[in-house]
Amino acid sequence: MDFFLSQDSLTAIQWILRAIVGFFFLIIITKIMGQRSISQLRFLDFVMALIIGNIIAHPLSDEKLGLKGSMITTTVLVVLYVFAVLLSLRWVAIRKFFDPSPITLVENGKVKYENLMKARITIDLLLSEIRREKIEDLQKIALAIWEPGGKISIFLDPKHLPLTATDLSFAKKPFHLPKIIIKERKIMYDELQKLGKDESWVLKEIEHTYATKLEDVLIATIDQNEQFHIVLYDNDKCIYR
C-alpha cells in the first residue's frame, strides 16, 4: 500500500495502482452522486465537479501527495452534496438557492432586456440559440426561458407551429416500444415470459416465417401486434426484414 501514501518517487507499477484506485473511486463517487450530476450540470453540480476534479487530479500526478487525504476530502464533499440535494428536495427555499427560478427572455416576440442582465447573457447569445432552433424571426416566439441548467427553452407561437396529425384530425396509434426477444443469438427469456411465450414458439417463428436459424439472428424484436423484426448476421453485415 506504499503507493497510497506520499512518496519521494513512485515506480511505474505504483503509478498504475494509483490510477486504478482513483478510477474506481471516482466511479463509486459518481454513482453515489446520481445521474443528475451526469445529465445536467446545475449550480451545485458544477461546483462539485470543479472541486472533486481538482482534489483527485493532484495525487494522481504528484507522487509527494498521498491518495488518502484526497479520498477522505472527496467522500466528505459527496456526503455534503447528497445532503444538500436531499434538503433541496424537501425545502423550497433551499431549492431556490441551488436551482434558481427560470428567467423569461422573450415573451410574445418581445425581448426582455432587463432579464438578459439577470441571466448574464448577451443578445448575441440569445440570437445564436434562436438560430440553432431554426427560427429566423423573434416575432414567431411565444416564450423563451433561460433554464437553471444554462439552456434556453423556446416555444413558438401556435400559428407558426407545423401541422400535426391531431390538427388534421388523423387518428394516430399509440406508441409501443418493441421488445427485444433475441440479442446476439441469445433468447431473452425474461421478455418471453412477460409476453406469455416460450422458446419453442420463437424458434418456430424464425424458422418458418424467416427461414433462418437462431445462430444467424443478431437482433429480433416483436411489436404489440406480435410482428417480428429481425436483423441477421451476414458476413459481418446486417439484413433487415
Image (tube, rainbow, N blue to C red):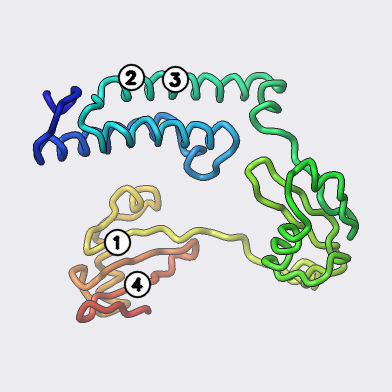
Q: Secondary structure at mark 1?
A: strand
User: Mark 3 = which residue?
Assistant: 79
Which of the two residues, 1 or 233, is positioned nearer the viewer here? Answer: 1
Query: Crowding at label 3, few (<14), some or many (≥20) Cα neighbours within 10 Å?
Result: some
Residue 165 coordinates in the image, percent (x, y): 74, 70
Residue 187 coordinates in the image, percent (x, y): 25, 57
Q: Secondary structure at mark 4?
A: strand
Marks 1 and 4 sit apart, C-alpha to C-alpha, by 9 Å
Which of the two residues, 166 or 235, is positioned nearer the viewer here? Answer: 235
Q: Which residue sits at x=74%, y=35%?
A: 101
Q: Amino acid at mark 1?
A: Ile
Q: Is residue 207 left or right of residue 142?
A: left
Q: Quadrant of the N terminus?
A: top left
User: Mark 4 = which residue?
Assistant: 230
Marks 1 and 3 sit apart, C-alpha to C-alpha, by 42 Å
Residue 10 coordinates in the image, percent (x, y): 12, 34
Which of the two residues, 241 or 2, is positioned nearer the viewer here? Answer: 2
Query: Crowding at label 1, few (<14), some or many (≥20) Cα neighbours within 10 Å?
Result: many
User: Mark 1 = which residue?
Assistant: 182
* N-term-proximal mark, 3 vs 4: 3
